[in-house]
Amino acid sequence: MGSVLAGASVANAETIDIGIGTQDTTTNTVTGGIVIRQLGLLDKYLPHTGKYKNVTYNVTWQNATSGPPITNGMIAGKLQIGMMGDYPLLVNGATGHATGNDTELVAVIAYNAFGGGNGVVVPKHSPYYDLSDLKGKRVSVPFGSAAHGMLLAALQSRGLPDDYFALTNQSPEVGSTSIQENRIDAHADFVPFAELLPFRGYARKIFDGVETGQPTFHGVVIRKDFGQKYPEIVTAYIKALMAANDWVRAHPVQAAQKIEAWTRVNKEVAYIFLGPGGIDTLDPTIKPRWVAALKTDYAVLKKLDMVKDLDIDKWVDDSFVREAFKETGRNYDAQLASFSNYQVQGTDAVCNAPIAHPSQAGQIWVDGGGVASFSSAACTLEGVNRYRAQGKKLDAVYLMDSKLGVKVFANDAFYTVGAAGAAKPAIEPFLLKRDAQASAKQSGAQVVGYAQALSAVGNGGK
């Protein structure tokens, strides 16, 4: 196999080609690609001493909408670094090994420990509210994607046959149009589309990947020969990724606005994933739980004869990310053991209370302004009424799902409202109608929509 430098030796190399395959519209990969590129972070960390003293770097960025084209570029030797979701990562590793173009998983970009980010949506006014409603219906998914894997795992966990749906292959772009024009009954997709399509007003989510309980993440793969030849460059890339993560956490509103400008994914959708308490956690460590999840995912694909052989333990290489932590003075083992995300904080100006329980917090993004935080769903809804009374336009209202624990758009949620007469009615938001109905059945509460939930609270007046 030819060298990635096509004849230049390390000692006197003038140019090193670094091809990076990105997924700019896949929101939980942005810190591995578009953020690094736009902020110039890779240039900050690439080595220029020792064997790299006289080197010129030729960095190219190739954007794709899914993992398979990136894998193709890596196998062809045109890309040295790539990023993709869990199921495509496995195909990447297996394909590389089978063709003599071995790859390695060297870092994680973002994860949801329970499967959030993947989801199934139906047209806005569809009569379907559950996967079981879709028997024999037209369902599309990008084949080979993390969402495809989620769908297969969901069917297997429910004991349903793999042909339960009339499943077809559609890219996120085609699937989005098909939902909008009612050409299909449902579309399964990865981040951000199961949030993006409902936010844009023509879809409703009926299944969230969290229901699988199976971790999902996007990670970074490299060509193994490139990593062996230039380990310092791989470490530099991961340091740039970590700096991008730090920037998003330090400036979540600005980051969401920039991501919209760079990718056209609405800022409100970028924020629901990457803001405080968001669906995804930015963390480059390769946790044992992720390796175990990959083995479970691999079994799903292997059962359907959709993947070649792969020794996952040999394919995973955390030496580069460990070195990046060491060089930046961070404790890898401490972060490896942590599953915490940064959370909503501050004081609730409507209910005059500190935000003591982030899992119950809400936020309102005021048009032309910042994001205000609230201590509970009821206080958030009171804030909505207050802002509306002041004539303010709201870009988004966020709440935490009472069962699934993921951030949701308030206007798409279902609510249980306790008996009238209480000073502050007990209100709980749910992404899924069936979860709200199950809770109401136990508590005797009423299931209502967003407008009724707003009517059930005051306007936050003093």
Image: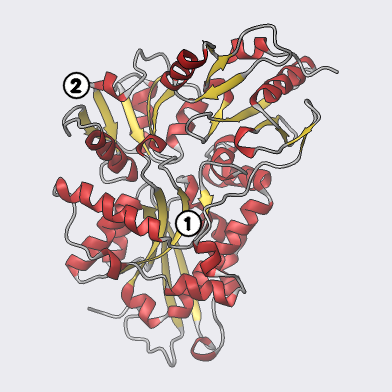
Q: Answer yes or no: is residue 388 visible.
A: yes
> Residues under labels 2 and 1: Cα distance?
36 Å
Residue at position x 71%, y 29% in the image: 367
- Say whether marks 2 and 1 touch (CB < 8 Å): no
Lower sequence index among marks 2 and 1: 1
The x, y position of residue 237, in whole percent, is 50, 69
Residue under label 2: 136
Q: Secondary structure at mark 1?
A: strand
**Residue type, mark 2 in image:** Gly
Residue at position x 35%, y 38% in the image: 212
- 41 left or right of 62 in image: right
- 356 left or right of 134 in image: right
- 99 left or right of 393 in image: left
Residue at position x 62%, y 58% in the image: 246
The x, y position of residue 140, in whole percent, is 28, 31
Q: Secondary structure at mark 2?
A: loop
Which residue lies most toward the top here?
A: 421
- Tell me the quarter of the image containing the N terminus: bottom left
Residue at position x 27%, y 22% in the image: 132
Q: Nearer the viewer, residue 440 or 75?
A: 440
**Residue type, mark 1 in image:** Ile
Residue under label 1: 109
Q: Nearer the viewer, residue 337 or 372?
A: 337
Measured along the vertical axis of the image, is residue 146 above or below residue 38?
above
Sort mark 1 into few (<14), some (14-19) or many (20+) by Cα contacts within 10 Å.
Answer: many
The x, y position of residue 258, in whole percent, is 62, 47
Q: Answer yes or no: is residue 69 visible.
A: no
